[in-house]
C-alpha cells in the first residue's frame, strides 16, 4: 500500500512532495530513490496465475510510492527478473524476483527491488539520496536483515512477519482518509490519473522484461 498524488505532466515543475520538502531543507537535489518490497513467501499458485504478474501485483505499490515521494513522472523503465528455479513462475510467464531501473523526467533515478520470497520476513523500505544528504523510511528494529558487522545489534528484531503488522499504522490512516472522503469532509487524495500513470509504469516494466530492453512509458501511454 502506498500513497497517491495527482499526475504531473512530464517536464513540468513538480508540486510539493515529501522528497521536495525534505530536499529544500536537507537532501539537496534528489538524484536516487530506492524502493524495496520483499514478501516473506510466495502466494498460492492459483493467486499467482491470476495476479497479472509481479509488476502489476507487487511492484505497482513501489511505483506508486516513488512517483509520489519524488513528485515526478517516470519516462523510461528497464526491468529484469528471475524465477529462482521455481517452475510455477516460468509456467505462468512470471518471475520470483525482479529489479527495475526507472528514469524520471528530471533525471532522477529510481531503483525498485521486489521479491516473492524473503524467508527472514516482510521487508518494505524507501531510501532517498540527494546531493547534500540521504534519508530512509522503514529502518526500524523489525527490519528483516541480519548484520554481519561485529558488535552491531541493529536491527534488534523480531523481524516484521507480514504486511498486516508491518503496515498497520498506514492501514488505519488509509481507512480514516477513506471514511472522510466517503463522508464528504475531504477530497480524495488519489485520482484516477494517479492509478493510470502507475499502471502505465507496470505495463512498461512487463514489456521491458519480456523484450529485454528499456521501454519509454510513452510507448504504453495512449
Image: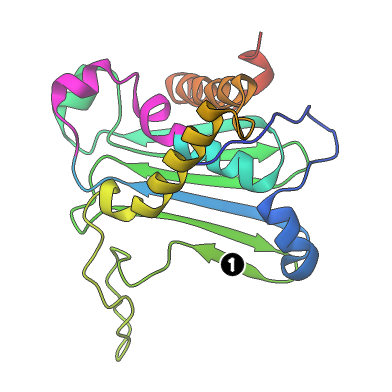
Compared to residue 124, the image places residue 71 above or below, namely above
Side of 39 where 108 appears, left or right: right
- Percent coordinates x, y for residue 209 in the rendering: 44, 25
Q: Is residue 1 visible?
A: no
Side of 221 where 106 appears, left or right: right
46 and 90: which is toward the camera: 46
- Percent coordinates x, y for residue 194 in the rendering: 61, 26
Where are the magenta residues, as a range? 42-60
The structure residue drawn at horizontal position 33% and vertical position 79%, both measured from the top left corner, is 154
Q: Residue furthest bottom?
A: 151
The structure residue drawn at horizontal position 72% and vertical position 56%, both measured from the top left corner, is 30
Residue 1, magenta (yes or no): no
Compared to residue 61, the image places residue 26 above or below, namely below
> Quick one: SS at disc 1?
strand
The structure residue drawn at horizontal position 62% and vertical position 41%, both measured from the top left corner, is 68
Q: Quadrant of the C terminus?
A: top right
Which residue does the numbered mark 1 point to in the structure image? Answer: 135
Q: Quadrant of the N terminus?
A: top left
- Percent coordinates x, y for residue 93 in the rendering: 29, 18
Q: Main secondary structure of the magenta part?
A: helix
Count of numbered badges drawn on the protein:
1
The structure residue drawn at horizontal position 75% and vertical position 31%, both measured from the top left corner, is 8
Compared to residue 17, the image places residue 25 above or below, namely below
- Percent coordinates x, y for residue 162 in the rendering: 24, 49
Q: Residue furthest top?
A: 222
Residue 171, quarter of the rendered image: top left
Q: Is residue 19 visible?
A: yes
Residue 47, magenta (yes or no): yes
Q: Callout 1: few (<14), some (14-19), or many (20+) C-alpha neighbours within 10 Å? A: some
Amino acid at each position: 500500500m502506498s500513497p497517491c498524488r495527482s499526475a504531473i505532466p512530464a517536464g513540468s515543475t513538480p508540486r510539493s512532495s515529501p522528497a521536495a520538502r525534505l530536499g529544500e531543507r536537507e537532501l539537496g537535489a534528489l538524484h536516487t530513490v530506492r524502493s524495496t518490497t520483499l514478501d516473506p513467501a510466495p502466494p498460492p499458485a492459483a493467486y499467482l496465475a491470476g495476479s497479472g504478474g509481479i509488476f502489476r501485483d507487487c511492484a505497482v505499490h513501489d511505483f506508486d510510492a516513488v512517483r509520489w515521494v519524488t513528485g515526478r513522472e517516470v519516462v523510461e523503465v528497464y526491468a529484469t527478473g528471475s524465477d529462482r528455479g521455481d517452475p510455477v513462475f516460468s509456467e505462468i510467464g512470471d518471475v520470483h524476483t525482479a529489479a527495475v531501473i526507472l528514469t524520471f523526467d528530471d533525471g532522477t533515478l529510481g531503483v525498485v527491488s521486489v521479491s516473492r520470497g524473503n524467508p527472514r520476513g516482510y521487508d518494505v523500505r524507501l531510501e532517498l539520496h540527494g546531493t547534500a544528504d540521504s534519508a530512509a523510511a522503514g529502518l526500524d528494529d523489525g527490519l528483516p536483515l541480519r548484520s554481519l558487522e561485529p558488535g552491531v545489534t541493529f536491527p534488534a528484531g523480531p523481524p516484521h512477519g507480514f504486511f498486516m503488522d508491518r503496515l498497520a499504522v498506514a492501514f488505519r490512516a488509509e481507512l480514516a482518509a477513506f471514511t472522510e472522503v466517503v463522508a464528504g469532509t475531504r477530497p480524495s487524495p488519489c485520482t484516477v490519473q494517479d492509478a493510470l500513470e502507475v499502471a502505465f509504469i507496470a505495463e512498461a516494466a512487463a514489456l521491458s522484461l519480456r523484450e529485454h530492453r528499456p521501454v519509454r512509458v510513452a510507448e504504453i501511454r495512449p
